[in-house]
Image (cartoon, rainbow, N blue to C red):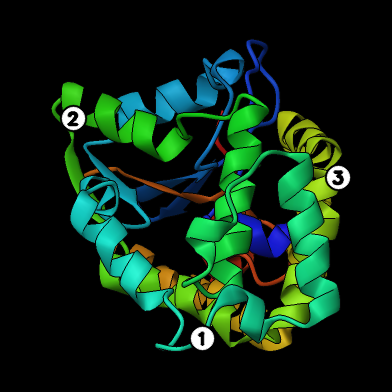
């Protein structure tokens, strides 16, 4: 379930690497046009920067940088307010009332052991609580500024044009999709993975360090698909299909676009990479 939490955070992966090795960066070409694709993670340790040299060169080559959504908008107080409102339980319900006594006891024990606030979260849906605790736990591990936030800032500093694949409202709906899962099951598995969060993140970061997209899918995409094919389709497969339509359009322009999305969208059989190859585009690692 931590893989589901990662997507709720719209997480992906990046790692410090100063040698010329594989990275989660690809080049898509058609005739004389090209698009660069790079994987991101929305929370990363300061020690993981700088990213592999391919990221720096891809940014330098691009005239336009495309993110999943408007990074300024999703960091605004208005966006946080909208998400909070969508994640609130109906009047008269509480977190404790919608969870079984057994699962709520597990959650309460977890929160108490880590000195995490639980009372202020009573008005919210279990999925929102799981996401909140995931963020707090990652912050304790030293995860702070993500690749998308940093590269959005760098792109603006370098005078790049900015764009995005989805509106902030669409991003909200993908987070809301997690609230449609069985609340007790979601919370139980979330707590199990939160207990193992340091190890899970280490494995994912190590896979990214070697550019091992197959391992990333096995760690993140495959467990999500096994847990809920509907959720996987909503958060991964359907979005990837929509994004390839945008990339088709970018490949008709003379400039080079750098598209930066969660790295799990660039891994596995339903990845943007494989979808583009199926359409006949030439896709290779960016060197």
Foreground of the two, 173 or 218: 173
Give whichever of discs 2 and 1 has the lower sequence position. Answer: 1
Measured in 3D between alpha carbons, the distance from the residue under mark 2 to the one under mark 1, in whole angstroms, is 44 Å
Judge depth for marks 1 and 3 and give the one in front.
1
Foreground of the two, 243 or 118: 118
Secondary structure of the residue carrying numbered label 2: helix
**Numbered disc total:** 3
**Percent of width and height locating residue 149:** 36, 36
Foreground of the two, 42 or 273: 42
- Is the Cβ of the residue at disc 1 closer than 8 Å to that at disc 3? no
Secondary structure of the residue carrying numbered label 1: loop
Left or right: residue 123 versus residue 18 is left
Measured in 3D between alpha carbons, the distance from the residue under mark 3 to the one under mark 2, in whole angstroms, is 37 Å
Left or right: residue 63 versus residue 33 is left
Measured in 3D between alpha carbons, the distance from the residue under mark 1 to the one under mark 3, in whole angstroms, is 30 Å
Circle 3 sits on which residue?
196
- Is the Cβ of the residue at disc 2 closer than 8 Å to that at disc 1? no
Residue displayed at 54% across by 17% down: 46
Mark 3 Cα-neighbour bin, 10 Å: few <14, some 14–19, many ≥20:
few
Asked whether residue 234 is in view, the answer is yes
With respect to residue 187, does 181 lie above or below?
Answer: below
Give whichever of discs 3 and 2 has the lower sequence position. Answer: 2
**Percent of width and height locating residue 224:** 75, 70
Residue displayed at 81% across by 66% down: 105
* Quarter of the picture holding the C terminus: top right
Circle 2 sits on which residue?
156
Circle 1 sits on which residue?
93
Residue displayed at 37% across by 63% down: 247
* Quarter of the picture holding the N terminus: bottom right
**Percent of width and height locating residue 221:** 74, 64
């Amino acid at each position: 379930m931590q893989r589901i939490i990662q997507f709720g955070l719209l997480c992906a992966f990046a790692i410090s690497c100063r040698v010329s090795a594989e990275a989660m960066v690809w080049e898509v070409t058609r005739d004389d046009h090209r698009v660069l694709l790079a994987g991101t993670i929305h929370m990363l340790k300061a020690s993981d920067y700088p990213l592999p040299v391919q990221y720096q060169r891809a940014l330098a080559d691009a005239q336009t940088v495309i993110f999943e959504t408007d990074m300024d908008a999703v960091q605004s107080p208005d966006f946080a307010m909208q998400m909070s409102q969508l994640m609130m339980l109906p009047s008269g319900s509480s977190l404790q009332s919608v969870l079984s006594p057994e699962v709520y006891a597990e959650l309460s024990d977890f929160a108490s052991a880590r000195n995490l606030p639980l009372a202020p979260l009573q008005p919210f849906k279990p999925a929102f609580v799981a996401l909140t605790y995931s963020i707090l736990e990652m912050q304790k591990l030293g995860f702070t500024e993500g690749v998308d936030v940093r590269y959005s800032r760098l792109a603006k500093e370098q005078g790049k044009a900015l764009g995005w694949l989805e509106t902030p409202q669409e991003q909200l709906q993908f987070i809301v999709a997690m609230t449609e899962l069985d609340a007790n099951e979601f919370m139980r598995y979330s707590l199990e993975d939160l207990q193992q969060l340091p190890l899970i993140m280490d494995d994912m970061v190590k896979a990214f360090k070697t550019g091992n997209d197959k391992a990333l899918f096995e760690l993140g995409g495959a467990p999500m698909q096994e847990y809920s094919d509907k959720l996987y389709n909503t958060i991964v497969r359907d979005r990837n299909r929509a994004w390839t339509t945008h990339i088709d359009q970018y490949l008709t322009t003379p400039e080079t676009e750098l598209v930066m999305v969660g790295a799990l969208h660039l891994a596995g059989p339903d990845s943007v990479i494989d979808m583009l190859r199926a359409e006949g585009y030439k896709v290779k690692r960016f060197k």
